[in-house]
Amino acid sequence: MYLQRRNRILRKNAAIRSLVAETVLTPQDFIAPLFIDEGRDIAYEIPSMPGYYRYSLDKTVQEVKALWGLGIRSVLLFIKCEDRLKDNTGQESWNPDGLMQRSIKAIKDAVPEMVVMTDVALDPYSEYGHDGIVKNGEIVNDETAEALLKMSLSHARAGADWVAPSDMMDGRIGIIREGLEKNGYTRTGIMAYSAKYASCFYGPFRDALDSAPGFGDKKTYQMDFSNRREAVKEALSDVEEGADILMVKPAMAYLDIIREIKNAVTLPVSAYHVSGEYAMIKAAAAKGWLDENKAILESLTAIKRAGADLIATYFARQAVALING
């Protein structure tokens, strides 16, 4: 049989496949999320996220040093706020001596070149577990945005390289950008969660930080998973308001959204490989239903192939070990 083209020639062995691979993962693709708690010498394994831990600050610094040694260049910080400090204003979130602020300073002191990104949302600090201030059973937008600005400024003062608003309030990127500019933080970046969906895949994360909503759900501010065009609209709004990186969350079930936004903007696009996606792979692997290492690399490659320039993933450490062989 004569064929003008034999496409399998480019697949005949591993060496050739690696030469022509269109998508290649590197350690620099990953943002490592870190959960931080008060205390010392604490490494609490999250039950719904086997192999992942919430660390005290001393242990967190050790972990950051290890991640840097592996070639990972960015971390995204989340803190577990003590119940006694939670209220409806979120005021602990801009406490200059709060756990987040102390964590930023400790990490930048220990590994100055590590890119430190910080979660900006009120749910860890809210007595209601919502991402905003509650009035008459409603999550109010404008007052929440002002609280998020205070929070962002406190992170910038502590030394954060990037703030990452994950709340989905209208207009908060513009308010934060204006506030950073007016206060002289002209080198602080904003990674906007531009398309954050009201997803069932966040469950283990809420276990990790005890931040599940105390009433209702988050569907009045996080996006409806039925919608695609709306994600592009949200992303373009964040571009106009001054975002530097756009985030899609979750990642695996939203590869089409990553690609839509990548095609619509010129800014870098990040994606969050969320806790539920992590837990599913871990659970299936524990049952022997799939090969964990192969599933990690295939999933992360798919996210990058879809258009993500950066990937926040709980598999960052494992993935780098697999990439480096």
Image (cartoon, grey):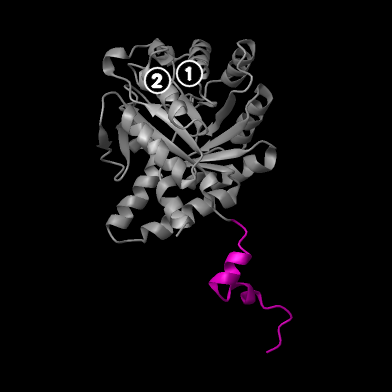
Q: Considering only vertical position in the picture, is 297 above or below 142?
A: below
Q: Is residue 236 visible?
A: yes
Placement of the N terminus among the 4 image quadrants: bottom right
Callout 1 amino acid: Ala
Which residue is at the front of the view, 26 or 248? Answer: 26
Q: Secondary structure at mark 2?
A: helix
Which residue is at the front of the view, 259 or 16? Answer: 16
Placement of the C terminus among the 4 image quadrants: bottom left
Q: Is residue 323 magenta?
A: no
The CA distance from mark 2 to mark 1 is 8 Å
Provide the residue designation for mark 2: 102
Provide the residue designation for mark 1: 158
Q: Position of residue 263 (x, y in %)?
A: 68, 43
Q: Residues within 10 Å of mark 2 (few under 14, many from 20)?
A: some
Judge from the rendering whether residue 235 lies leftward or rightward of residue 299; answer left or right.
right
Q: Quadrant of residue 191?
A: top right
Tell me the tag on residue 133: none
Q: Quadrant of residue 294?
A: bottom left
Q: Residue furthest bottom?
A: 1
Q: Secondary structure at mark 1?
A: helix
Residue range of the region highlighted in magenta in the rendering: 1-23
Q: Earlier in the sequence, mark 2 or mark 1?
A: 2
Judge from the rendering whether residue 259 lies leftward or rightward of residue 212; answer left or right.
right
Q: Considering only vertical position in the picture, is 219 above or below 14?
A: above
Are the residues at dot 2 and dot 1 in contact (C-beta closer than 8 Å)? yes
